[in-house]
Each structure stands twice: as structure tokens, then as C-alpha cells.
Image (cartoon, rainbow, N blue to C red):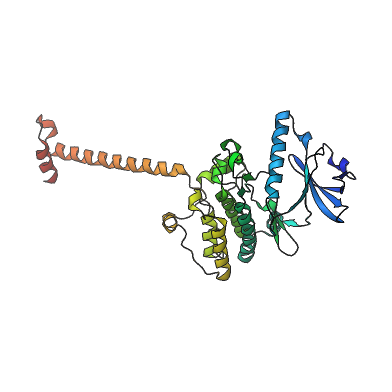
Amino acid sequence: MNRPEKLIGRTFGGRYTIVSVVGIGGMSVVFGAYDTEKKCTVALKMLDESSCDSDESRNEAEERFKNEINAMMRLSHPNIVNILDVSKPGEPLYFIMEYIEANTLKRKIDENGALTPEETLYYTEQILRALIHTHSKNIVHCDIKPQNIMILPDGRLKLADFGIARIIDSKHNRESDMAVGTVYYISPEQASGRRIGPGSDIYSLGVMMYEMATGRLPFSASDTSAVSRMHMEAQPLRPRVIDPDIPRGLEQIILHAIEKTPFMRFPDARSMLDAVMTLENNPYTVFEFNREVEDRRSEPREENTASNGISGWIFALFGIGAAFIVVLIVTLIILAVKGVIFSGTILPVSSLYCLWTS
């Protein structure tokens, strides 16, 4: 499908006539289509086999596309883009979704900068409701980012693009089948190639909340591998350092969601939603998330990597060694003054102690 516009006017499934090209991805194309049976516009997402340069990559793309279909067919929720139909045997691989004319959350942030705390919480609540449903079906989205959040004209959100979603069951949860996601929003476990779970989506949502609340990403660099390392090792600047007007409770929710270790985050999307709704009802709420961890946090820094801990030990050992050398030099000076060193006489330790204290 080197020129997807060539398919305009073609009808698939006996009822879906392609009328426009909506978007082109790495291995798929989304078309606007007219459903002649229901008399409405739909979105048709089709696998682009021409983007595959070998039989192996083609098989991998087909498996991934079928996995997306399988994941979406398990889901039905007001905050998730719904799948309506799938291709018939013998047709190109495609599926039909509801057609949404909407802005993306990413575009809204890029155009307006930081959102208000109220907007941040309102959008987060809807995303969490979508994740509660998704995770209840044993699906991890793996690519939660504002580009995949559609904002409808009435303010409702729709979670889209399950292209790299993982179904957490039997054969789908293989160590060799880890999802990468988008580098600026991936969890530490995704960045390091470890097993993912619902906590990975919570982390990515925490990164999104940080961006919504501050207008900037917690970790950013021109080198994507450096961003990955930051997700694994660095601590972000606290949101309230960027904007002191951000409510303390909102900052706490964000930092709790982006803890490096999954078990230190919210245990699930439901508990995170409870915290969000509590803050919506009372903007002055202060939480007690991981209090012992928060107490150990020093003044905020742009970067605080694991190597800093090693450096601290090195400096401590250096200090101890320097102190020992100073004491030894002072002792030798005292002994020299008292004529001990050059007398040719070796005194016992008890005598040296008496000389030191005399």
C-alpha cells in the first residue's frame, strides 16, 4: 500500500466504502469510510503489508495487528474507542472502529501549555476509568500517551491505539514479547526490558499528569537512550518547583504514580482513581503516600541517578582515610617533639598513649 489514496472509492466487507486517508502509521493506515448499511461514517484501520521488507517482518506485523484486534474486541467502554467489525476471510487485514472527529490531548497541551489542576484531574479521571476496564480484561495498553487520548467536543475522552497492547495470559505474556512504547512515557520496566503489568500504564499516566500539570515532560533529552536511562535512574524536578500553584495533593499523586519500582506506585487504577476523586472533592487534601520515601527526598534536582549513591560511599571512605592520615601525622609530630622517634627506642602502645594524652 505504497499509495493508500489509491484505495479511495474501494468497498470492503460489502459495505465500507473508503472516502479519505485519516492517518498513516508504521505498519497500518487509518481511512475514513462510509458504512452503506448503517448510513454513517466509520474508521477503517488496515494493515500495510507493503511496509514489511521480509516474510518474517510481515508475519510479525500480522501477529501484532491481530493482537490489537483481539485486545479491542474484549473491550467496551465509553472512554475507549470501540471496535465495530473485522475483515472477512480472503480480504486484506483490517478492522472497523467508531469514527471520531476530535482533538488529541497532546495537541491541547502543545497549544495551551500547562492545564489547570481541575482539567488535569478531570482528564485523568476519565483515563483511569478506561484503564480500570482495560486491566479488568487482563490487557495492558503499554502506550499511554497524550497522542493516544482523543478529546471529544463535549470534553469526554477516548483512549485509542491498542497496537502494542499486551494480553496478560498464557502465551501472550512471554518475556521475549515485551512492549517498548513511546520513550518519553515508558515505565522503567519497559525501558529495561523487564516484564510489564498494569503498573506500567499507571507510570505512563503519571508522566502524562506531570506534563498536563507543568506543561513539560519529567525527562527530556535529544538522545532517546538517555531518556530511557532517566526513566530507570533519575528523579524528576518536583511539579511544585516548576509551578508553586499546583496543589500539594496533585503533586503527591503524580510522584506516587511515577515511582521507579512498580510496587511503590498505586496498586491499581482503582486506588489511583479514588485518590483523584478525593482531591477533586477537596483540593486541599494531603495524602500519606510512601511517607518514609518522601521524607528521604532531598531538595529537588534535575537528575539523581543510582551512581550518586556510589559516589556518596566513595566520598565517605575518602573522608575517613583523610582523618586517619591527619591523626597519624599529628601523632608523629608529637612523638618527634618528645624525642621518641629519633631516640632509637621503640615504646609500647601504652607508653605512646600516655605521650599522646600528656
Q: x, y percentage for residue 347?
A: 10, 34
Q: Which of the pair 75/2 is nearer the observer? A: 75
Vertical order, 115 against 91 (above or below): below
Which residue is depicted at the point 46% across and 43% down? 306
Which residue is depicted at the point 79% across and 34% down? 50
Q: x, y percentage for residue 157?
A: 69, 59
Q: Residue furthest right?
A: 9
Vertical order, 240 against 200 (above or below): below
Which residue is depicted at the point 69% across and 55% down? 76
Q: Is residue 53 left or right of residue 184?
A: right
Total numbered labels: 0
Which residue is depicted at the point 56% across and 44% down? 196
**Image quadrant in which you'd find residue 180:** top right
Vertical order, 125 against 259 (above or below): below
Q: x, y percentage for residue 93?
A: 78, 40
Q: x, y percentage for residue 229?
A: 54, 42
Q: Is residue 23 visible?
A: no
Q: Is residue 48 left or right of residue 320?
A: right
Q: Is residue 229 visible?
A: yes
Quadrant containing the N terminus is top right
Q: Which of the pair 337/2 is nearer the observer? A: 2
